[in-house]
């Protein structure tokens, strides 16, 4: 078996950077807002065209048809030996069609979803392509999963992600690294959401004020209890981000509703917050309180398996002359699901840049060949471990 040459891999990627850039721009221009089915289908066709252009019929593809969101795609090589590595990406974006132009300026490429995370998706394809071209064979079994609803909670893809991940030895999440330090993400907070509705009793605010039971007044007390659960030392935050209530100013408000976001660093803290929210009580006996929701994404924590993968990435970085750093992130990803299953997961393997969910969203193209090479070499190092990393 031919030994990997880090120089050959990086040289191959560098020599193909113009083709790589053209594919990236093509993919970003295939705009894919999470809620626009027709646009997502067009982007799906673009992904399939790019993928088959690189690998022909070497991979089998399974398309998970969805009614409302975009479809989810899974590629794998039947009976390919070696550890199974799942490359996990999403192709939906937060941007509506036409909101952001695709612009190249001073070494940066701007566009909708380019940083989060179409560049990372393409990076995974080119990393495997580079190994095939320089080695002629693979020492691991790549599995690609491209999902279409991550930005709206992964409600239709979560089960597919978890089912696929359970068949794999490691998960490489192709989300972008941290914007400033370009670090891989060793921790992500767990994310939860609640909707809380209070129902009181309406009455005329002038004639029969004493007969009314204000849902807004009760909800104001609940909001203070919720915000009081925030504990920065523990990394726990609670945010009441939306509130609706009442009808007109001269009527005691019968209804009030809030939407709550919470973030936690570990599963123990998630249980504490869930218990606190779900046991909320009211101060007025005539208030009816309905609490709906819970933890949406479990925390991605520094498990033994996750840290072992990070150590391999650092080793790969040394071979390539790339300094690999690790960091924590407040937002969640689909890697939260796979890590919670106990499957070694490494996040933030996408392309350096900045502006996630912002109008200056961009990647620094100069880093593209190097980051693809880092992913490729990490895969090779993992395959040499023959599964030891997942112990």
Image: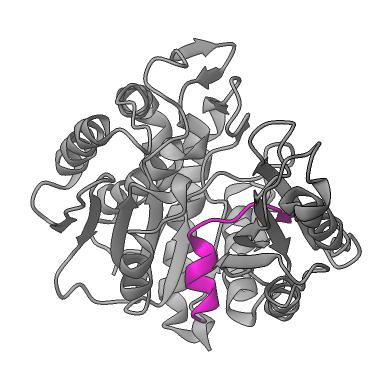
Measuring from the top left, give residue 289's x and y in whole percent: 65, 66
Q: State whether residue 350 is above or below residue 32.
A: below
Q: For residue 309: magenta?
A: no
Asked if residue 58 shows in the view, the reply is yes
The residue drawn where x is 39% and y is 59% is 155
Residue sitting farthest toward the left: 57
The residue drawn where x is 29% and y is 63% is 143
Residue sitting farthest toward the bottom: 391
Measuring from the top left, give residue 12's x and y in whole percent: 37, 38
Q: For residue 332: magenta?
A: yes
Q: In this view, does 54 lie to the left or right of 362?
A: left
Comparing 316 with 327, the one in front is 327
How was the colour assigned to the protein in this rendering?
Answer: one colour
- Figure label count: 0
Q: State whether residue 288 is above or below residue 212.
A: below
The residue drawn where x is 51% and y is 48% is 175
Comparing 355 with 266, the one in front is 266
Comparing 305 with 389, the one in front is 305
The residue drawn where x is 21% and y is 52% is 66
Quadrant for the N terminus, please. Answer: bottom left
Q: Is residue 388 left or right of residue 225?
A: left
Corner quadrant of residue 277: bottom right
Q: Bounds of the magenta span?
A: 325-341
Q: Is residue 194 left or right of residue 44?
A: right
Asked if residue 140 shows in the view, the reply is no
Measuring from the top left, give residue 46's x and y in whole percent: 21, 33
Corner quadrant of residue 177: top right
Q: State whether residue 150 is above or below residue 163.
A: above
Q: In this view, does 309 lie to the left or right of 86?
A: right
Residue sitting farthest toward the right: 233
């Amino acid at each position: 078996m031919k030994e990997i040459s880090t120089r050959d891999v990086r040289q191959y990627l560098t020599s193909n950077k113009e083709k790589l850039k053209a594919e990236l721009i093509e993919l970003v221009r295939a705009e894919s807002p999470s809620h626009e089915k027709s646009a997502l289908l067009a982007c799906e066709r673009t992904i399939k065209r790019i993928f088959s252009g690189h690998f022909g019929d070497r991979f089998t593809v399974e398309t998970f048809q969805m009614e409302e969101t975009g479809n989810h795609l899974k590629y794998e090589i039947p009976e390919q030996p070696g550890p199974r590595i799942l490359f996990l990406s999403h192709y939906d974006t937060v941007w509506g069609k036409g909101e952001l132009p695709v612009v190249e300026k001073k070494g940066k490429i701007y566009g909708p979803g380019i940083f989060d995370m179409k560049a990372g998706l393409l990076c995974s394809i080119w990393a495997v392509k580079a190994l095939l071209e320089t080695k002629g064979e693979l020492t691991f079994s790549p599995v690609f999963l491209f999902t279409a609803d991550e930005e709206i909670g992964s409600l239709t893809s979560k089960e597919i992600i978890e089912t696929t991940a359970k068949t794999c030895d490691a998960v490489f999440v192709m989300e972008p690294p941290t914007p400033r330090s370009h670090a891989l993400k060793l921790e992500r907070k767990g994310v939860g959401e609640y909707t809380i509705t209070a129902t009181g009793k309406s009455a005329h605010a002038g004639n029969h004020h004493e007969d009314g039971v204000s849902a807004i007044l009760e909800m104001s007390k609940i909001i203070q209890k919720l915000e009081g659960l925030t504990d920065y030392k523990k990394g726990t935050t609670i945010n009441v981000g939306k509130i609706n209530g009442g009808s007109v100013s001269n009527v005691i408000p019968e209804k009030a509703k809030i939407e709550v976001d919470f973030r936690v660093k570990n599963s123990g803290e998630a249980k504490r917050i869930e218990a606190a929210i779900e046991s909320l009580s009211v101060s007025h006996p005539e208030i009816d309180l309905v609490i709906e929701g819970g933890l949406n994404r479990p925390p991605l924590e520094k498990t033994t398996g996750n840290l072992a993968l990070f150590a391999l990435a650092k080793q790969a970085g040394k071979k390539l002359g790339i300094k690999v750093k690790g960091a924590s992130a407040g937002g969640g990803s689909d890697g939260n699901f796979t890590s919670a299953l106990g499957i070694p997961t490494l996040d933030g393997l996408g392309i350096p840049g900045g502006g996630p969910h912002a109008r200056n969203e961009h990647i620094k193209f100069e880093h593209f060949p190097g980051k693809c090479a880092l992913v490729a070499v990490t895969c090779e190092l993992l395959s040499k471990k023959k599964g030891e990393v997942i112990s």
